[in-house]
Image: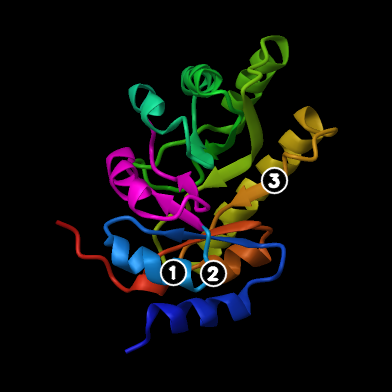
């Protein structure tokens, strides 16, 4: 049976230098996270605020935590003092709350705009027109305590390469459009977070700068 260390080493061989790996740690015990940390990993992604809050105090402070699941506005205050990046910003209301709580915490919060690129209805996210309206509003009413660093999308859970390619290309097109129209002068708007354990190689070939990998590192999850 492959170990966490062996799995990480194997994945690392396949990642270009410019691509960051977010180690997805949902449902995994702290001991497993420590194994990944000891292999040099420093970016960990959690889906739920409650689970993030339980794990964060037990692990080293140089971990950059990413919140990759849907975030309710009333939960922002709990993570505002330490979360490295919120990848799932999908509304003006949420961005305003993130800005408010980041201000209280005396820091600037990195975020990604989440887009709905999958065929499944259960996925959250903006579409391009909604993002245009949101960013036009922010151009007139800036939020000084957030930094929009790029886009995130969750592809359809499928083995259909053609379908996945279409969705990844769609997110890349969204990124390119927003970069050109709203962030042409911004060096910080540079991330495309897409691709998971089953499709990260395809996502990288379509422009991903950040991939979210869990199962390929830790094995199948045992959901309660």
**What is the quadrant of the N terminus in the image?**
bottom left
Q: State the scheme by which the image is colored.
A: rainbow
Range of residues picked out in magenta: 43-71
Tell me if 96 is positioned left or right of 176 in this view.
left
Local crowd at mark 2 within 10 Å, few (<14), some, or many (≥20)? few
Q: Quadrant of residue 132?
A: top right
Circle 1/circle 3 CB separation < 8 Å = no
Q: Secondary structure at mark 3?
A: helix
Q: Quadrant of residue 35?
A: bottom left
Judge whether 122 appears above or below 72 on screen. below
Residue at the image point whose x is 65% and y is 31% from the top:
147
Residue underneath mark 3: 173
Q: Is residue 181 left or right of residue 200?
A: right
Residue 16 is inside the magenta segment: no
* Disc 1 secondary structure class: helix
Residue on which disc 2 sits:
40
Q: Are there few (<14), some (14-19), or many (20+) residues within 10 Å of tag 1?
A: many
**What is the secondary structure assignment of the residue under circle 2?**
loop
> In 3D space, how far apart are the residues under numbered discs 1 and 3 (Cα atoms)?
33 Å
**Measured Cα–Cα span from mark 1 to mark 2:** 7 Å
- Tag on residue 70? none
Instruction: Give the residue number, with chain letter if any, for mark 1.
Output: 36
- In percent of width and height, residue 116 lies at 49, 40
Identify the residue shown where x is 37% and y is 86%.
2
Query: Does the rendering let one see residue 39?
Result: yes
Number of marks present in the image shown:
3
Q: Could you tell whether 6 is left or right of 182 in the image?
A: left
Q: Residue at x 39, y 55 (%)?
A: 59
For marks 3 and 2 on the same chain, the one whose residue lies earlier in the sequence? 2
Residue 36 in the image: state x and y as whole percent: 44, 69
């Amino acid at each position: 049976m492959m170990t966490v260390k062996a799995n990480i080493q194997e994945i690392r061989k396949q990642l270009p230098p410019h691509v960051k790996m977010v180690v997805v740690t949902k449902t995994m015990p702290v001991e497993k996270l420590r194994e990944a940390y000891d292999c040099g990993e420093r970016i960990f992604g959690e889906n739920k605020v409650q689970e993030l809050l339980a794990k964060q105090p037990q692990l080293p402070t140089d971990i950059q935590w990413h919140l990759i699941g849907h975030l309710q506005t009333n939960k922002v205050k709990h993570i505002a003092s330490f979360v490295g990046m919120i990848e799932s910003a999908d509304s003006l209301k949420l961005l305003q709350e993130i800005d408010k709580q980041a201000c209280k915490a005396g820091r600037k919060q990195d975020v990604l705009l989440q887009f709905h690129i999958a065929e499944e209805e259960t996925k959250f996210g903006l579409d391009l027109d909604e993002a245009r309206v949101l960013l036009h509003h922010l151009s007139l009413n800036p939020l000084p305590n957030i930094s929009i660093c790029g886009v995130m999308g969750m592809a359809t859970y499928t083995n259909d390469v053609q379908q996945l390619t279409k969705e990844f290309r769609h997110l890349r097109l969204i990124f390119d459009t927003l970069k050109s129209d709203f962030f042409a002068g911004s060096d910080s708007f540079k991330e495309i977070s897409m691709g998971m354990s089953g499709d990260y190689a395809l996502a990288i070939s379509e422009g991903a700068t950040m991939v979210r990998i869990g199962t390929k590192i830790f094995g199948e999850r045992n959901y309660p």
